[in-house]
Image: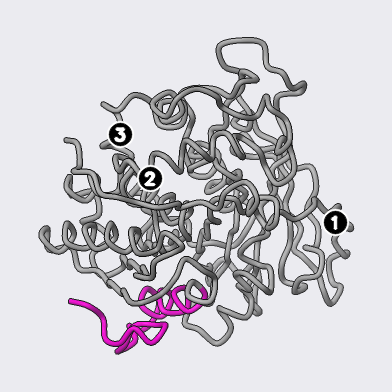
């Protein structure tokens, strides 16, 4: 069923912001040998779940507990409806992983995993940059004592398996990569709780949409979800405009790869670009958070689902706040226990860091009496 439309302003930065926040690819040094002070553990199954490991190394400029895995997969990219303009079609994809301070391989003490998704125009480094997510500091002394997995998702990938293709006849399959390949690969290589009870997914903006999308479609994979200033309704005309614009400004680009290559872009009108990313409108209810809520797809997350959104104008957050409020009401109408925090915030990192702290306290410890960002008590 089509969700009523609401006005919206950009969920993504425009092209200038994409370039301004981009970080150049960095070649990491090899990991230290096992036993060194800054060691990353060896990986027992480097080539598993349809992923091929290229490098596993320390993340430059980060904690010794943070590593970068570079992998290739047929999911990124897939040839579609013509001869691809890039050869080879597969390109390296990075996954940044933060291990807990006491990480060890003791099978009697597995660790929970938090999959942390970046926003539109961002990249694999977004959650770990000190002037953005600063995840090491954000999670210090919190209730979360597990592994954080921060995967690449493309500047405008929208956490979807694209049914269509770029102008260069190739398509990313981000959902397949994240859920079908990366989750089992992480379980095969790290000491994890290998069930939904040990996995959470959270993200900002486009990544908030991704977190809600994955949680609603895969309740057998995840048991907790946090959405910070999320996209919630792809039927909304304003949201469609931003998604369509992102297909032109960023397309299927990954960090700098393809950002200036027209063959990574998607031309055409808004309906065509929406169909490229999500398929025909008849398939959207199964991908749209508000519809997933109406269909009861979040019922299993009762008590471990959290929504956060500001209400300030000028950054699109006012409209995002209104749409998040509608999702909150859908969940409330269906008696799905959840945390909902809303206030006069903007679409910016100073709000999302506190959101993350609040979410892990709620999901892994005791829910704080008040919401973050001086938003006062949780809105009922």
**N-terminal-most mark, 2 or 1:** 1
Picture quarter containing residue 208? bottom left
Q: Single out the mark in the foreground, 2 or 1.
A: 2
Q: Single out the mark in the foreground, 3 or 2.
A: 2
Picture quarter containing residue 73? top right
Image side of residue 180 versus residue 216, left or right: right
Relative to residue 89, is residue 319 depicted above or below? below
Q: Residue at x 17, y 61 (%)?
A: 329
Q: Single out the mark in the foreground, 3 or 1.
A: 3
Image side of residue 79 versus residue 321, left or right: right
User: Where does the image place residue 328, in percent across and percent down from the top left?
Assistant: 22, 63
Question: Circle 1 sits on which residue?
Answer: 28
User: Where does the image place residue 128, in percent across and percent down from the top left?
Assistant: 66, 67
Q: Residue at x 75, y 55 (%)?
A: 23
**N-terminal-most mark, 3 or 2:** 2
* Magenta span of residues: 353-380
Indicate yes or no whether the magenta region holds residue 179.
Answer: no
Question: Circle 3 sits on which residue?
Answer: 284
User: Where does the image place residue 51, in percent across and percent down from the top left?
Assistant: 65, 38
Question: Circle 2 sits on which residue?
Answer: 239
Q: Are marks 3 and 2 in contact (CB under 8 Å)?
A: no
**N-terminal-most mark, 3 or 1:** 1
- The label on residue 264 is none
Relative to residue 270, is residue 97 depicted above or below? below
């Amino acid at each position: 069923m089509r969700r009523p439309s609401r006005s919206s302003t950009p969920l993504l930065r425009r092209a200038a912001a994409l370039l301004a926040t981009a970080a150049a690819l960095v070649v990491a040094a090899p990991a230290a040998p096992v036993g060194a002070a800054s060691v990353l553990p060896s990986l027992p199954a480097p080539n598993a779940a349809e992923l091929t490991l290229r490098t596993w190394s320390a993340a430059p400029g980060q904690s010794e507990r943070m590593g970068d895995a570079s992998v290739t997969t047929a999911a990124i990219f897939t040839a579609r409806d013509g001869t691809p303009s890039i050869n080879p079609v597969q390109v390296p994809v990075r996954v940044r992983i933060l291990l807990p301070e006491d990480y060890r391989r003791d099978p009697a003490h597995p660790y929970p995993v938090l999959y942390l998704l970046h926003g539109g125009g961002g990249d694999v480094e977004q959650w770990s940059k000190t002037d953005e997510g600063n995840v090491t500091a954000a999670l210090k002394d919190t209730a979360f004592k597990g592994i954080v997995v921060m995967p690449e998702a493309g500047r405008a990938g929208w956490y979807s398996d694209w049914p269509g293709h770029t102008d260069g006849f190739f398509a990313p399959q981000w959902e397949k990569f994240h859920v079908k390949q990366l989750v089992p690969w992480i379980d095969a290589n790290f000491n994890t709780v290998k069930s939904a009870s040990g996995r959470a997914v959270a993200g900002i903006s486009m990544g908030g949409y991704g977190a809600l999308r994955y949680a609603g479609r895969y309740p057998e994979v995840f048991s907790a979800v946090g959405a910070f200033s999320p996209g919630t309704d792809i039927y909304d005309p304003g949201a469609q405009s931003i998604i369509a614009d992102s297909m032109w400004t960023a397309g299927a680009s990954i960090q700098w790869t393809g950002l200036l290559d027209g063959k990574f872009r998607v031309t055409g009108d808004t309906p065509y670009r929406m169909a490229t990313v999500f398929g025909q409108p008849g398939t959207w209810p199964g991908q749209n958070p508000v519809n997933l809520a109406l269909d009861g797809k979040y019922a299993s997350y009762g008590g471990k689902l959290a929504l956060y959104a500001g209400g300030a104008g000028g950054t699109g957050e006012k409209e995002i706040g209104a749409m998040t409020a509608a999702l909150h009401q859908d969940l409330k109408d269906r008696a799905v226990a959840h945390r909902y925090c809303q206030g006069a915030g903007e679409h910016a990192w100073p709000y999302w860091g506190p959101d993350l702290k609040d979410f892990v306290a709620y999901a892994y410890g005791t829910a704080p009496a008040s919401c973050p960002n001086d938003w006062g008590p949780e809105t009922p």
